[in-house]
Image (spheres, rainbow, N blue to C red):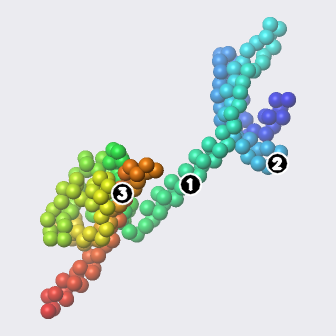
Amino acid sequence: DAMAIYGQIFEQDAMAIAAKEARAIETMTSFSAEIHFLLPSGRERWGLFTSTPRRLADNRLIWDGVEMDITERIRTAEELKKTTALLNQAFEQSPVPMALVSMPDAVMRIINPACLEFLGMQDEPSYVGMSLFEFTPTFIDCDAQGNPGMVADLPLARALRGEPTLGEERRIIRKDGTERWELVSAMPIRGDHGEVIAGHLIMADITERKSMEAQREEAL
């Protein structure tokens, strides 16, 4: 009884299936659809249907089709989506400047607002989606002695090469001329086989601490 199946389909899916079936009958071609079911037990499941219409000698219409249970695949995808959303919001809402770059293409995936503000880039177009090595910064990133560094030599780039950085003091000169001090940590993120799949950068603002240290030195 086909209605025993159709009666379990969520309404929005049932309307979409009806439209696909009508199109398949009109063209006598196959159709495929992912369908969301609510079973009598109250449990939800998803199925992937592929079906082809054909007519018998007496012009009756029948369907030849198969269904694959894709419940676990759908649930896994939903959990991944939730996890990704949580990760993005953790970055976005963190008061700590952070950035995430993926490998093997060194594409900048996340640059949180705190990072943009710290570097004086909050008024610039988004750099998300750009390769780190195509990025031309509007700030100058210096080591503790004031020596400017090339992008390829900075902690985040080193992390992409598998070299971690923990608590390195650096000085940022922003495009408006103001300076910020940072305590940088950049770590490689590795995959299941030990390969570097991303680099994660954290910059703790130590500008106030460095200012107080300078004042104490002047007072001596």
For label 1, the crowd category at 10 Å Cα-Cα, with few meaning under 14, some 14 to 19 and many 20 or more, is few
Compare marks 1 and 3 and give the one earlier in the sequence.
1
Vertical arrangement, residue 30 with respect to residue 145, above or below: above
Residue extending farthest to the right is 1
Tell me what residue is drawn at x 55 percent, y 50 percent: 81
In the image as oriented, which residue stretches furthest toward the front?
193
Q: Where does label 1 land, which residue?
A: 82
Split into 4 quadrants, where in the image is the C terminus?
Answer: bottom left
Mark 3 falls on what kind of element?
strand
Q: Earlier in the sequence, mark 3 or mark 2?
A: 2
Amino acid type of disc 1?
A: Lys
Q: Work out how far the residue at label 2 is from the one at label 1, CA to CA, in angstroms.
A: 26 Å
Q: Secondary structure at mark 1?
A: helix
Measured Cα–Cα span from mark 1 to mark 3: 24 Å
Placement of 193 over or under 141, stated as above or below: above
Instruction: Kindly identify the amino acid type of the residue bearing the numbered disc 2.
Output: Ser
Give the mark nearest the N terminus, 2 or 1.
Answer: 2
Question: Is residue 16 visible to us here?
Answer: no
Write down the quadrant of residue 178 in the picture: bottom left
Please indicate whether residue 136 sits to the left or right of residue 37 in the image.
Answer: left
Front position in the image: 24 or 199: 199
Mark 2 element type: loop
The residue singled out by tag 2 in the image is 41
Residue occupying the far bottom of the picture: 220
Location of residue 64 with respect to 184 vertically, above or below? above
In percent of width and height, residue 163 lies at: 30, 58
> Mark 2 Cα within 10 Å, few/some/many (few <14, many 20+)?
few
Label 3: how many residues lie within 10 Å, few (<14), some (14-19) or many (20+)?
Answer: many
Say which quarter of the image contains residue 73. Answer: top right
